[in-house]
Each structure stands twice: as C-alpha cells, then as structure tokens.
Amino acid sequence: MNKLGRGQRDKLQQFMLITGASEKVAFQALKASDWQFEGAFDLFYSHPQLRSVADTRHIEELYNRYKDPYVDMIMADGISLLCNDIQVDPQDIVMLVVSWHMKAATMCEFSKKEFIGGLQAMGIDSLDKFRERIPFLRSELRDEQKFREIYDFAFGWAKEKGQKSLALDTAIGMWQLLFAEKHWPLVDHWCEFLQARHNKVISRDTWSQLLEFARTVDPALSNYDPDGAWPYLIDEFVEYLNETSIIQKGKLSEWNYKS
C-alpha cells in the first residue's frame, strides 16, 4: 500500500470513513473495482463478510428511540423523527431505498424485525453511519437492476393493506418520484392522461409494464409497436398522445419536452 498514489490514498481514506472498513478491506474493495467508488461500495455492501458486524444492542437502542409508544412498531411520527436525525426529507426517494433494504411491508411503518434486520444488512448501528450511508443508498438508484427491484417493491409497499391494486393518486405520486430519477419525458403526460381518461386504480401489471415501456419505447414513439403486448391502458395513452398532438410526426413536440 506504500506505492499508492495520492488520489488512491485519498479514496482509501474516504472509503474507510464512509464504510467504517479497515484499511485492508477498503484496499481490497477499491482495487477489485479499479478504484471506482460506486463499484467498491457495491462490492462492500453486497458481501457481508467484508463488513464489520453491526452492534445489535445499538440498533435496538435506535429502534426504541423511534418506536410508537402504543404499538411495537415504528410509525409515521417515528419515521419523521428518524428522517430529521439523518437529515433527510421524509419525501426523499432515498427513504424508499431504505424501506426496500428493510423489506418493509407497508409505507410509513417499520416492524421491529424489518428495522433491525434492515440496519444489520446495511451495516448501520448508529446515526452517524446512517448519515454516511445515504450517498451510497442514493447511488443504488442508478443501477438498472436495483432500480427495477426498487420499482417493483414500491407497488406492494405503497398500496393499502388488503388491496390488490394501487390507488391512482398514490400511483401518480410514486411515478413522479421514481421517474424523476430516470428523467422520462412523458411522465407528466402519463399522469395527466390517467386523471383525464382513467381515474381508476392501477393494477400490478400496468405498474410493471409502464417501466418497460419507459425503458424501451422512444419518447417520440418512433419504435412503438401497436401490435405489441402492452396493457390496454398504455395503448390508450399512445392514442391520447397522438390525439392531443403531444407527438407530432414521430417527434415529441419541443414545447412538450420536459427533461
């Protein structure tokens, strides 16, 4: 390690500071990832044997700080306090990523098992470590596979207990949050279309297929196949775009383009 350049030494120190890893482990993760932070973080957090074991007692103390006084769970008020402690807005998409790691069943709730298991999996046993981990958690949204998993998770997490479908207003809010990360130019038009023409609950199939549509179909619909196996709602959306001249001659109108 004596032969490391100044830039590599700086990265080593920063990696150790953020993760709490030893110098040896930090060096191994960075070297294996060609000294790229994102790859090194991914390697570190996906291999539990590299992480220092989170202290369960400290996690229990955190749980007791946030749990509801009347039920053995962390509810909305506790999550709001947690967000304040880690300096994150409760509406920040990173809290969806946190919930995904905790395998939370319901929005605005963490069971004791979810909270403790999630923090252990993330190697977090203090608020300082939680705050330090936020940039990595946010970076996971840039990974296509993880984004897909988080997107699929969001449907079950956001729907009302006992319901098979997602309320329209909730679905719209989640889409605006998620697609803000992907800069899909048609997201606002999609939401306007649903409010004007659909105004019903959203099925899991529509939820799942919309991400595929956004990923594979050009915003100007130049490669859209009307004979493809899209849900009827997506086909109706394409008709809406054409009817309202949002799409003109295979191009997304300049004044309608929202980056």
Image (tube, rainbow, N blue to C red):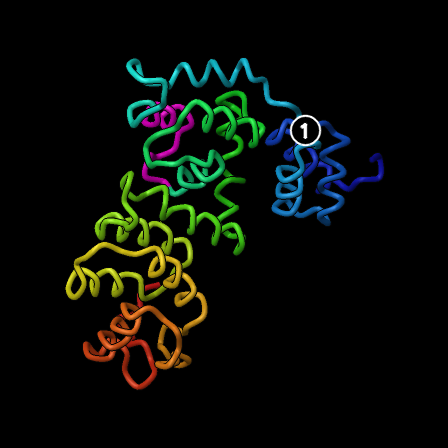
Left or right of residue 135: residue 243: left
Q: Nearer the viewer, residue 70 or 182?
A: 70
Residue named by callout 1:
21
Residue in view at x 72 percent, y 27 percent: 22
Rendering coords of residue 139 (x, y %): 52, 46
Left or right of residue 35: residue 154: left
So how many labels did they put on this image? 1
> Which quadrant is home to the N terminus?
top right
Up-down relation of residue 177 to residue 237 (above or below): above
In the rendered image, residue 91 lying in the magenta stretch gets the answer yes
**Tag 1: Cα neighbours inside 10 Å, few (<14), some, or many (≥20)?**
some
Q: Nearer the viewer, residue 142 or 202?
A: 202
Q: Quadrant of residue 183?
A: bottom left
Residue in view at x 51 percent, y 52 percent: 142
Residue in view at x 22 percent, y 74 percent: 240
* Residue numbers of the magenta segment: 79-92
In the rendered image, residue 156 lying in the magenta stretch gets the answer no
Left or right of residue 227: residue 248: left
Residue type at mark 1 is: Ala
Q: Nearer the viewer, residue 188 or 27?
A: 188
Up-down relation of residue 51 to residue 252 (above or below): above
Rendering coords of residue 177 (x, y %): 34, 49
> Which quadrant is home to the C terminus?
bottom left
Residue in view at x 48 percent, y 43 percent: 138
Q: Secondary structure at mark 1?
A: loop
Rendering coords of residue 215 (x, y %): 44, 66
Left or right of residue 140: residue 166: left
Up-down relation of residue 8 to residue 74 (above or below): below
Q: Quadrant of residue 191?
A: bottom left
Rendering coords of residue 110 (x, y %): 39, 28
Q: Quadrant of residue 98?
A: top left
